[in-house]
Amino acid sequence: MLARIVYYKLNSLPEEEIVVVNSFEKAVEIARRKIRMMGAVKVEVEII
């Protein structure tokens, strides 16, 4: 399945990423890992 992850930053446009995962929990894990690297303040995960 595919997951759409949107990273929201303070002073810029949101960045969107589409990843292939086998569960929603894996998508959330990927988002949590990258949120620190990107300096995002909010993340949105959606299964598509």
Image (spheres, rainbow, N blue to C red):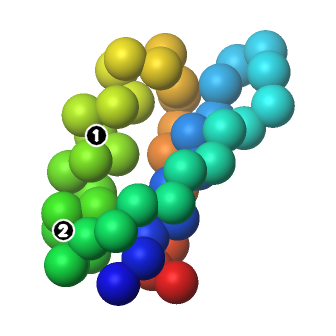
Nearest the camera: 18 or 27? 18
Q: Which mark is residue 25?
A: 2
From where the camera sits, is residue 45 visible? Answer: no
State left or right for residue 28 relative to residue 40: left
Front residue of this view, candidates 1 and 11:
1
Total numbered circles: 2
Task: Name the residue located 19 percent from the left edge and 78 percent from the top edge.
Answer: 22
Where is the N terminus found, in terms of image quarters? bottom left
Residue at x 26% of width, y 71% of height: 21
Quadrant assignment, res 2 = bottom left
Which amino acid does the dot numbered 1 rest on? Arg
The relative height of residue 6 versus residue 13 in the rendered view (above or below) is below
Instruction: Give the image location of residue 45, x and y in percent.
Output: 46, 63
Residue 32's tag is: 1
Q: Residue at x 81, y 31 (%)?
A: 13
Q: Is residue 30 left or right of residue 42?
A: left
**SS category of the residue bearing label 1:** helix
Q: Residues within 10 Å of mark 1 (few under 14, many from 20)?
A: few
Residue 32, position in %: x, y? 28, 40
Compared to residue 7, the image places residue 29 above or below, namely below
